[in-house]
Image: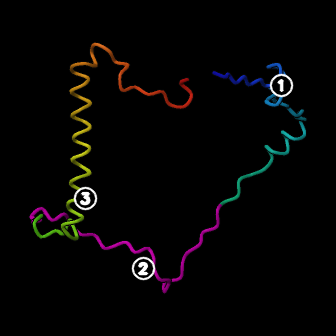
Amino acid sequence: MSTTTIENPNTQPLGTVLADYKLHYSKVTHQDVSDASSLEPQPAPSVRNPPDWPTNHRRVPPYRPINRDLDLSERIVFQNNVERGFVNTMFFGLRLVTLAHRSWRATGGKINDQYFRYKVGGEY
């Protein structure tokens, strides 16, 4: 059986790597500070739209109170039976995974919690 060895010839001390992140401060003179404090805030100009300006571009519907007598059987939820079957299958899969997780945690997961655990990036 053969073995493979990988060597990294580009090793740098930690100080040279961190040198890229050093902070550099510039000197502040008193003249710069006094110039900034002498600026007075300017009032914002008042601008009004013309009265004939269209406002329907926002597409905000007019206020409509809540329909408390809504019949949900009249609302179209699925376009066809294929879509209904697909959505039901997806939600059944989620219920199945949740049931398997809860049952494992309640039984075998109490004995050994390392089963069904996989390392993700950065945990190696």
For label 3, the SS is helix
Q: Is residue 121 left or right of residue 13?
A: left
Q: CA distance from mark 2 to mark 3?
A: 38 Å
Colour logic:
rainbow
Which residue in the protein does label 2 denote? 56
Which residue in the protein does label 1 denote? 9
Q: Position of residue 10 (x, y in %)?
A: 83, 26
Type of amino acid at the residue the image marks with label 3: Phe
Q: Position of residue 54 (x, y in %)?
A: 47, 83
Check if residue 85 falls in the magenta segment: no
For label 2, the SS is helix
Would you say the magenta stretch is mainly helix, strand or loop? Answer: loop
For label 1, the SS is loop
Which residue in the protein does label 3 denote? 86
- Which stretch appears magenta? 44-71
Circle 1 packing at 10 Å, graded few (<14), some (14-19), many (20+), is few
Residue 80, quarter of picture: bottom left
